[in-house]
Image: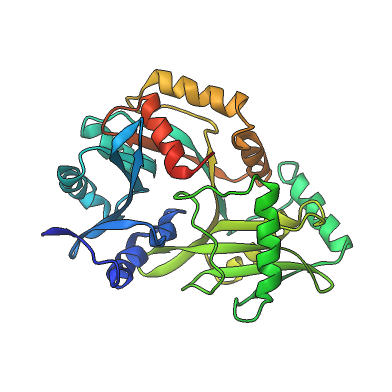
Amino acid sequence: MNPAASPSVQKHALLWPHLKQCGDQCISYSVLQPELQYFFVQDIGFIAYQQCRHGLFAPFGRTIVLGNPMCSEKHYRWITMRFLEKYPKTIFLQVERNYGEVLQSLGHEVNCFGTETELTLDGFSLAGKARSKLRQWQNGCQRKQVEVREENFSDVNLSAITQLSDSWIKRRGGHELRFLTRPFLLHGERDVRLFTAYQGESLLGFAVFDPMYREGEIIGYYHNVDRLAENAPHGTSAYIILKAMDIFRSEKKERVSLGLSPLFRLREPFTHRKFTADALWFTYHKLNFLYPFQGNASHKKKFNGQQKQVFFSSTQGNSLRELFIIIKALRLF
């Protein structure tokens, strides 16, 4: 087994078999982002990463890994050790508990980074108190004759999509997070689904769902992109998700992921940096002018889904310096 960085031109052809076999994280499809690089091992899998440099905190650069390795869990430790031989100064970001165990066993601190929300499609119901807000939003959208459609990018008005997206970004400070959030692309992609919401012929919003895979099959979707017009009725975003879930359920898919709520419900099952955990707690509760941490978590809580923790780990220790490097990579501000 000879590790090597894959050539950028043919990279997706090498990546697809491993993505379709092991890509069951909500961010798995995000490994196809154009700015990423790959540590590829023939017949084993790959690790997706990017290089980040900061004049003060990382003048010689940091390697930042996205999610778990794209390989069988039995190879996690081996491929990580080979990777760290080449890139010893690395931050692992939004990894799951099983990979956190590997990183801890290699002697690294592992801190909680937030919580992902998943919705099991089989048996999902709006009945009961826990999802009463979803019922209210759904009823409101139906009264206002909001229509949700699944469409192909080749069939939609791309000018209207672009205008709505640009307006949405502008209202939220003029930039988007990167790396953990796959950039929105104005064309169709393999297995990616687009849902739009209209009132008459007026576009109110749209959502893009990325596939999650296991053993060559699509097992569910991740709600990756969400855009709304300023005049969209309250609950339009949730209504799009609910209508998409109806279709995915009819296709016998397992789940929909609403993705990460950064810094929400921090729990520390691993050896970790306490000062950093305290700083993240403070950020979630007091620094929402940087990012709507609490609003993000509050919206997803209304779906009453299953929550699971995700983690980060730096080979240089989980210090505040490493957090600043992460902030730089995510373009938080």
Pick the residue in front: 96 or 230: 230
Q: Is residue 300 visible?
A: yes
Up-down relation of residue 184 to residue 261 (above or below): below
* Residue found at the very far front of the displayed protein: 55
Q: Quadrant of residue 22?
A: bottom left
Q: Quadrant of residue 218?
A: bottom left
Q: How many marks?
A: 0
Percent of width and height locating residue 231: 82, 56
Q: Residue at x 46, y 37 (%)?
A: 327
Residue 95 seen from this side: no
Give the percent coordinates (x, y) of residue 181: 50, 52
Residue 157 sits above or below residue 112 on the image = below
**Is residue 234 placed above or below 263 in the rendered structure?**
below
Going by the image, does 225 lie left or right of 31? right
Q: Which image quarter: residue 156?
A: bottom right
Taking 303 as reference, is 280 left or right? left
Pick the quarter of the image with the C terminus: top right
Quadrant, the N terminus: bottom left
